[in-house]
Image (cartoon, rainbow, N blue to C red):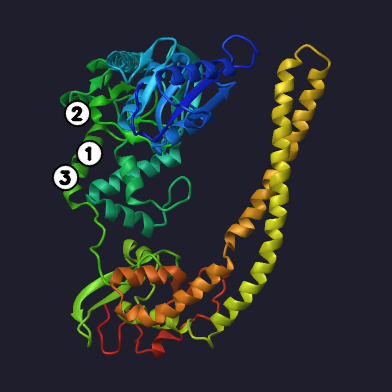
Amino acid sequence: MRYKNDKRKFAIYSRKSKFTGKGESIANQIELCKRYIQTHNENVRDEDIIIFEDEGFSGGNVKRPQFQLMMSELRNKKIKAVVCYRLDRISRKISDFSSMIDEFAEYDVAFVSIKEQFDTSSSMGKAMMYISSVFAQLERETIAERIRDNMHELARTGQWLGGVPPTGYTSIPIVGSVTVDGKPRKAYKLDLIKNEAALVKQLFEVFLETNSLTKTETYFLQNHITTKNGKNFSRFTIKGILQNPVYMAADKDSFEYFNNLNVDVYANEDDFNGRYGIIAYNKTLQKTGQANKVRDMNEWIIAIGKHKPIISGADWVKTQALLEQNKSKSYRKPKSNVALLSGLLYCGNCGNYMRPKQSQRLNANGEKIYSYLCETKEKSRMHNCQMKNPNGNTLDRLVCEEIKKLSEDSSEFINQLKQTEKEFLSNNSEYNSQLDIYKNEYEENQRQIEALVMALAKSSDTPAYDYINKEIAKLDCKNKELINKIDDLEKITGNNSMSATEFNLLEELLASFSKTFDVMSIEEKRAALRTFIERVVWDGEQVHIYLFGSEEKENLNNIIEDINSNSFDGCGEPQGGNCE
């Protein structure tokens, strides 16, 4: 390894599955790696080397604290080479190792394994890296092939694999078991829930009649028909149900549909007699920490399940054709407009958002007139909410004028702000002091636990073993209590985490707000309002402004007077305007 003018540091990584006190210990690994670095590089000091140690962790995965810390430092461009004693110290999985090597190359970091003489800073090392990548790819393809073989075996049985059953069904165990990836699992099948099945059938019927997700949503809203969890149906929930093949009968229409699309159908055509429903395996791509994604249909494996279907194959196929046809007419967010309260304004009747609706008419100032419309009112066609539409131009202006008044020295808000600052800084000092005590106690307990764990490893088969175990359990119990106390205090201080400087900054923002607001761009005005306002509620007569930090159901002196007294008529238009 030769690194000229590279200020980054060397990293040594060592790992051992458990403490033994002999053999290739952590200390031995580190010493050997240090010698290698100093032998192959001139003038390397101890401070040029960062050491990462994981003891008591398996190499079967990369979820090791010190390994993750090392990778974080690497991504922050603080490391130029990683040295370990043996390849299996850093990873036992070819796939993990290959991904790691790719990331090392991306950040121009060399990798050295002393035992195997693997050094990616040399030509031979790079060649070995490419060979390892080939083997990793082979392993990935082998795994994928094995999974698909598993799916075919499952398709032979038509079993339900578990998880949350789709609306209309529950899962029940059946006699026997299935093998998944070489491991036996309990066998399940879907069983019909009559009232939910009727709901699914109604969804298909309404959609096929209206040919519209929006109209289907409106129908269910107007008739107060909710999901099995008691929530309103959204267009996306409806679409998810309509696209799920589990509801479809395994009949001639469904067989022809999948066969024509070259989907892997794991059953004979004669078995598609309409008695049972379809099960689709390999339908979703599942990744830890991410929402499941539906795979392309040509990756599915279609089989005949053991459950009763809800709709015919013909209706499901027709539904998919209509959904595909409607893609070009799918919902789009409204284009940008001059409305300032989008995302802040709520309906006082149903609690839903009120969004701007722009007209082509102009007011006396030459501005396009727009109003705010409750989403529930719009989607239910005024059936579930009849909230009056306020004039947006006037409403925005009044809210802005009211916020400007907050900056006046005589305003009640400024007086409250100063009083709150005194009380908060006094209370917060006490909270922070107690928080420090709890945290110090927690850290001391952790140190004692770590020391006891080390002692535990050496006291196997001795009378001290049980005593040490009890002490560890006692300290762990105390720490759990401390974590709860720390969380509670952090919530209190976090919810009111304003310093004296921040209080002053808020006052300055308010002062500059009144002076510069009128010359701001639309985007700047929206951002400025969101600095102070948590939400705005329109109740049909008055608009209520809730500032950050206000009580949930209290108005904090910021109720604007009756809108009718500010040039509004009963329909929410300026006087002389037309009601929609």
Work out which quarter of the rendered image holds the C terminus and state it.
bottom left
Q: CA distance from mark 3 to mark 2?
A: 17 Å
Which mark lies nearer to you, 3 or 2?
3
What residue is disc 1 on?
320
> In the structure shown, which secondary structural element does the residue marked by tag 3 occupy?
helix
How many neighbours does mark 3 have within 10 angstroms: few (below 14), some (14-19), or many (20 or more)? few
Q: CA distance from mark 1 to mark 3?
A: 9 Å
Query: Residue at horizontal 69%, vertical 40%?
Result: 443
Residue 257, numbered label: 2
How many neighbours does mark 2 have within 10 angstroms: few (below 14), some (14-19), or many (20 or more)? some
> In the structure shown, which secondary structural element does the residue marked by tag 1 occupy?
helix
Front residue of 521 and 304:
521
Whether pointer 1 and pointer 2 mark residues with C-beta atoms closer than 8 Å, the reply is yes
Q: Is residue 383 visible?
A: no
Q: Position of residue 112 (x, y in %)?
A: 40, 18
Residue 130, numbered label: none
Instruction: Work out which residue is located at the far front of the displayed protein and give it.
Output: 43
What residue is disc 3 on?
325
Q: Is residue 47 above or below residue 355?
A: above
Residue type pointed to by label 3: Gln
Residue type pointed to by label 2: Tyr
Whether pointer 3 and pointer 2 mark residues with C-beta atoms closer than 8 Å, the reply is no
Q: Position of residue 356 (x, y in %)?
A: 30, 69
Query: Residue at horizontal 24%, vertical 37%?
Result: 315
Residue type pointed to by label 1: Gln
Front residue of 35 and 247:
35
